[in-house]
Image (tube, coloured by chain):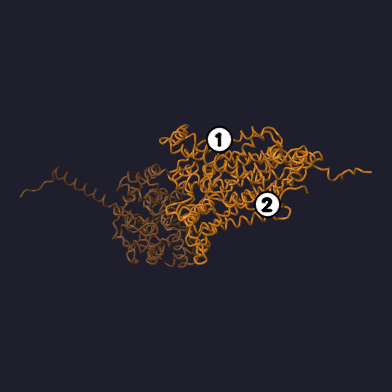
Amino acid sequence: MTIAVPAPLAERGGFKLDLTWPVLIAFAALLCVLVLLPVSWLVVYSLTAVDEATRARELTLHHFAQLFSDPDLVAPLITTLIVAVSSSAGCCLVAAPMAWLVARTDLPLTGPIRALVTASFVTPPFLGAIAWEILAAPNSGLLNQLYRYLTGAPQDDYLLNIYSLPGLIFVIACYTFPYVFVLIANALDRIPGDLEDASSILGGRTWTTARRITIPLALPALLAGVLIAFLQAMILFGSPAILALPAGFHTMTTKIWSLFQYPPKPELAAAASLPLLVFTVVLLRAQHAILGRRGYSVVGGKSGDPRLIRLGWLVVPAMAFVGLVLTLPVFLPYFALLNAAFSPVATTLLTPLNATLHNVYFTFFELSSTQLALKNTFILGSLAATLGTLLALVISYITARQAVTGHRALGFLATAPIAIPGIVLGVGLFLAYTRPPFVLYGTLWILLVAYVTIELPAAYQQLQSAFRAVHPELEDASRILGATRLRALRDVTAPLLRTSVIATWCFIFVSVVRELSAAIMLFTSETKVVSVLIFDLKESGDLGAIAVLGLSMLLVTFAVVILMNRIPGFGGARLRNT
Amino acid sequence: MRQHRFTRRDLLRGSTALAAGAAGITVFAEPLRAAPPPAEAITPRLIEAAKKEGKVAFYTAMDLAFAQQLGKKFEATYPGISVRVERSGAERIFTRIGQEYSSNIHAVDVVNTADAAHCIVWNRNNWLEPYLPEDVAKHFDKTYYDPDARHITTRILISPIAYNTNLVKKEEAPRSFKDLLDPKWAGKIVKAHPSYSGTIMNATFQIARELGWEYFEKLAQQRVMQVQSATDTPKKISLGERAVMADGAGYLVIRYKEQGQPIEIVYPEEGTPLAQGPSAIFRAAPNPNAARLFQNWMHSREAQQFLVDWARQYSPHGQTVEKPGVRPLKDIKLMKEDPEGVHRSAEEIKKRYSQIFKV
């Protein structure tokens, strides 16, 4: 016999303050200011010019005319598109099979493999580009030296030339493939086994199941990953600055940056960024059209364990493939950096005889900017990660649950910054925050705003696909029992999304540490960050200091990420039914 | 004897003479009016005031290793004052200072640039403070500092050719800029960029003046590797990445050669481009006393000798002793420097260079 016990009156009585609406509106307003302010300044600057005589701004389409007619501006645009398409295609070809192998098969060592992919993600692309320079510069590169040693080829011969378009595409693909891998692997993790079991019960073989169940379920994540990889490749600044300029060609981002060297031409740069924005909007609409209205929730109130596919003898080529893939962004570059850190000349192979601690000493005890840069970076990283995750969580809740009218516009706003190259966002912020009432230039705040704005889209995408996977029925159940929306979000949904939230925090932190393109526009000597310091060192050619600084940065970032994942109540490998 | 009457002609003659004299005085009075400030020595009071401020922000285009060493030496000489070195190419530093000042951020105390044209702009904006260290008044030739002592040449830079001795034999090495156009050097040359480096901005201006822009157009056909800093090209040579550098910091070539790196310097037959590296204090400096102390110390015999000994640069100080093994400035055929010309044509140089070299 069951007795229904009424809840004690004290809990239900009294006035409950429902903070849902104020909180949601406040976050929405913050998002609007964050995104619309710099974008509107960009639009203003691209459509106006300062009249020489009257010093007033006048409307003009001259900048756009120049943009599409000047070959100096058209060529970089085409180069950028080629780079973005090739590197995202390359990423997908590599990341999708690898994610499937790791998430859905009985491949051994999946833990270390995931960790190494994280390592590849944590490595800033510009640091990777520098490391690949040390490895594959045509005459001095370590790999080319090895090639000449093994084949006896003459001094002028080389196997790999990193200062070229394929070289740039390769390096960019190396450091954007983690995005695709993580998104697909997470999605595949969440697919419960009963759907695939049902398919095999009905007679489907492994490949049929994969084709008709697994892949469609992973499609949103795959598309999101491709989109992010494409856009990241399009807006990267560090790698092209390091590899394309010596080779004699510009990409859009380096061209925009060069437009800011004295005397600056912000109008032209603003005009140059608007086509990229339009292009991204088109891509996002296309993604929406492909996915349509199909629901992809797989974590309902009822789930099963995922079924792992047995590889058998295929495990050998699979491991070889995974190993090869991981060598390129992780093992080889880290080796090159270690070599450069402890060797007197970066491209001389390290031996016990010539090892030196001079570079380490120089970086930490002589270089006066080191301490300041490290401090700034980690303050900014933590602050931006916390604020960004919070903002992304609330905004993705609003759009996933359609809680506020105009949520579609909010969703668009949250993803809009992804289309603006970091360097141009830097300019927009510069234009917006060097005038009253908010004069933030010269402080860490402007960098914080820049970082949160830049990382918001990716964080939002991550949390949104996590939300999509959690069926509303769980929150509905709690709301039926009397919880407000906010309470349901806090007590029911957030714990389910805990892993995603922590992952997003770490993601933003790592992205902030590796972000260069906006920082290079907004920093001043007091607010320097490590990425800018490394870039400065690269321009003057101090490879030893770069290697030491880069390796220390990596070490500390790894430490933070591991720590966050180990804190009790926070971490946990992946979501399982608990 | 006729009485000389004061005629209208006399009046005309007299007033003309008077007017001419007045005009002459006005013209020649220009430098007189702009007399340099009194020479200042390093006094205990200055040191005390500087120590109270405790730090100095030094924006410089010197190569990083030397800039940090200089800072450390200053800190050792005057404990309690820390030097924060902000190092980048001279053109980049110029842009950054401009950006900071236009947003009312006054972070820089002392600047050392490799492009004297920057001082012309800063003077015009009235950003620099006149300050004449005693050593400069006594031992520097007057051509090395502004009449108002608003900027003082701290070092003299040359931009020679250099080559990697492992990759190029001495007999085959290029001996002039024209030699670099030989097809055998295609794909083997590394060069720095005038939009980043003040030394290279000056070198580009001087080479364009002597050899014409057609020279650069032909050089661009050689598939030159384009780096940014004049301090990067010697590094690329000693890495072995390219065989020949078309321009770069001569002092680094000498320094690396003495360290045993496989690099050798070549003074081009047409003349070696020259750039003076002036330093200045900013009026709005956040640490004015520390700035003065640093500027004073940087031009003292001790620091200048350190410049010669450690950095292997050329010093304008009359009492420094050249190290043997370095060819003295007077023995090198130099191209003529022209800061005014650079100031007028800097934008055009950058634009034309980008068009020719595509980056």
Amino acid type shown at disc 1:
Phe
- In the image, what residue type sits under mark 2? Thr
Q: Residues within 10 Å of mark 1 (few under 14, many from 20)?
A: few
Residue A295 x, y percent position in the rendering = 71, 35
Residue B339 placement (x, y as % from top left): 34, 50
Say which element carries label 2: helix
A355 or A273, which is in the foreground? A355
The chain under label 1 reads: A
Circle 2 residue: A110
Residue A435: x and y, percent? Answer: 52, 43
Image position, residue A84 (x, y; %): 54, 41
Q: Is residue A319 above or below residue B165?
A: above
Q: Is residue A403 left or right of residue B95?
A: right
Q: Counting residues from the N terminus, which is met first, the one under dot 1 or under dot 2? A: 2
Q: Mark 2 Cα within 10 Å, few/some/many (few <14, many 20+)? A: some
Q: Is residue A555 left or right of residue B87?
A: right
Q: Colour of chain B?
A: brown
Q: Is residue B115 left or right of residue A117?
A: left
Colour in which the image shows chain A: orange
Eye-nearest disc, 1 or 2: 2
Q: Specify the label residue A346 is tagged with.
A: none
Would you say residue A328 is visible in this rendering?
A: yes
> From mark 1 to mark 2, how far is it between C-alphas?
37 Å
Query: Which quarter shows the C terminus of chain B?
Result: top left
**Residue at 47%, 38% in the rendered image:** A267
Q: Which residue is mark 1?
A: A279
The answer to whether residue A537 of the structure is visible from this angle is no
